[in-house]
Image (tube, rainbow, N blue to C red):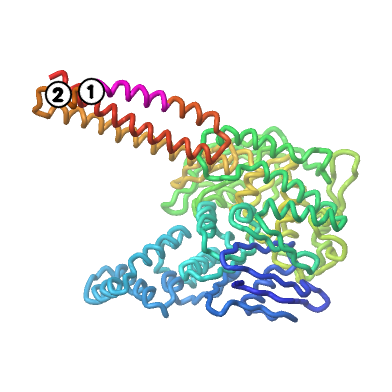
Amino acid sequence: MNFLSVERVSKSFGARVLFKEISFGLAEGEKAALVAKNGNGKTTLLKILSGTEQADTGLVTYRKDIKVEFLHQDPELDADKTILESVLSSDNPSTAAIVNYERELVKGTYGDQYQSAFDAMERLQAWDFEGQVKTILGKLGLHETELKIGPLSGGQKKRVALAKILISQPDLLILDEPTNHLDLDMIEWLEQYLGQRGITLLMVTHDRYFLETVCDVIFELEDQKLYKHPGNYSAFLERKAEREEVESVNVGKAQSLMKKELQWIRRQPKARGTKSKARVEAFQEIKKEATKDVSEAELKMRVKMTRLGSKIIELHKVKKAYGSKPILESFDYVFKRGEKIGIVGPNGVGKSTLLRLLTGEEQVDGGKIIIGDTVKFGFYTQQGLKLDEDKRVIEVIKDIAEYIPTEGKGGDITASQMLEHFLFEGDKQYTYVSKLSGGEKRRLYLLTVLMSNPNFLILDEPTNDLDILTLNVLEEFLLNFQGCLIVVTHDRYFMDKLTDHLFVFQGEGQVKDFPGNYTEYRIAEEQAVDDRRLREESMVKAKKKDKAKADVKAKDKTKLTYAESIEFKELPAEIDKLEKERDRLASALEQASSDAELLQRLGAEMQEVIDSLEEKEFRWLELSELAEE
């Protein structure tokens, strides 16, 4: 039975029709995503589902006995409540008990009120639930739970609203861009959380790794219609291409981009997060293949950027701190032509600060930054979205430049052609800025940055609120951009596709230069964790071995029993047999490097053999010590 049924729903704003008589359902356990171009009505449809917007026609029905929670782009929270009070519903006895108990802990008086709160926790058996609450808050970076909602940033409020929804454990989650304002670690945790069996989900997201690994159905809103695509992102791309071919629709750029996207994602490792050595080695080949995709012959345009000289940007012993919090500590780097660098790290460690230092918006505390004479910055930032609402789209672009030069014989690109390339086609170019959706305004602002024809692009969270087709257009442009690129983004897919190496902000002013993209970095990090675990296990085994020797020497025993003598004679043959089996499995593991299931089974067998071998060796050592006495 469906948790949600949408029947013949339509919505228009004046003469503009967003969607007409669309119908779909969501069954228990399904994880669905809604995708569409900006301005096609994704957020409006979610508002209709939540009841904050009325449909012109049609019916939205939920199963009567289920609990539904919504995450809106701009959630409304009580400014006077604390974070903890906001995420816990007071009409639930367990959550009320947790709020009281945490409040008494903060006071630290441990008097009668504390004892009463403690007794309530015991009576309601709320300890496990408290642990779940703290885990979710911690994973979303909400550690100071006594802070009031009012002074929080928009991103923090969005995380509080998300935590509230997850903690309430609804039967159906409906989420509008849940990954916005999350750092990469938070996004990966949320991906795993939402991927659990039993969670029913409908979300609007441009995070293509979410679409690939979490979703089992994708609804596409296009040309006022709704199309259902069973499967993940790869399946969506394939079915969309098939539909367009069958319908013989001349979609031009969009069709070409979707085909490229499908080719690229098929090359990516499917089991992201696995830790095999073979995958680490294979990723270099995958990366080479991914970058082959856009050839010069396929380009719609190649912008002739302003010449970039030999000296670009040099950072020498750069220091920056806010009070006692170090952001950069003696950071050195010399930029080279054509570099594409991603910047990663938790929220608040200084990623955006580095960008502002490079562009001169902030000054260093120590060291120096040398900017080459030919460097022309293009800086896209979340705070830079300031467009004249009373101007038409094409007027905004022409105010920057009437045209930009290109390489080859194609001629210059006019403002109108550039708008078409970024999906502002026909009458849309003469629309007033005030009539654009939030995503369309961000696309227009991004285009104003690109239209200035920079040779050093700095993009701070450029993917927020952009639809997937726009992201494909932007990626195509940036893959062929000949200048330097620095990007801060929580979009792992975007970063994987574009970056050559990373600046990893590790906190306390330390920045690591990693030679690879984000997925390669995560593989390397997981491998490092595995190596540390193996070293620790090796140390534990060595200590056990030393203890076994000590225990043997401590025994007051002068000779072996008859049974021990027999066992002692048989052990060398058993050990030899286990060693041969270990070698056979090691060889099999090498041959099975591309078969994940076989690798897992052989790995388990290998561990059993190693454990048994160690046990036999320890026993032989013990008996040999006794035999020598």
Residue count near mark 2 (Cα–Cα under 10 Å), binned few <14, some 14–19, many ≥20: some
Earlier residue among tags 1 and 2: 2
Q: Quadrant of the N terminus?
A: bottom right
Does dot 1 land on a helix, a strand or a loop? helix
Q: Are marks 1 and 2 in contact (CB under 8 Å)?
A: yes
Q: Between residue 407 and residue 13, name the one nearer to us.
A: 13
- In the rendered view, tell whether residue 321 sits above or below residue 64: above
Residue count near mark 1 (Cα–Cα under 10 Å), binned few <14, some 14–19, many ≥20: some
* Type of secondary structure dominating the magenta stretch: helix
Q: Between residue 194 and residue 284, name the one nearer to us.
A: 194
What label sits on residue 560 in the rendered view? 2
Q: Between residue 103 and residue 203, name the one nearer to us.
A: 203
Residue sitting at 45 percent across and 77 percent down? 80
Q: Position of residue 154 (x, y in %)?
A: 55, 66
Q: Position of residue 629 (x, y in %)?
A: 12, 19
- Three-letter amino acid code of the residue under disc 2: Leu
State the separation of the CA atoms marked 1 and 2: 9 Å
Residue that carries the numbered disc 1 in the rendered image = 568
Q: Is residue 469 magenta?
A: no
- Over which residues does the magenta segment extend? 569-582
Residue sitting at 68 percent across and 51 percent down? 234
Drawn side of residue 535 relative to residue 584, left or right:
left
Q: Is residue 575 magenta?
A: yes
Drawn side of residue 413 relative to residue 274, left or right:
right
- Three-letter amino acid code of the residue under disc 1: Phe
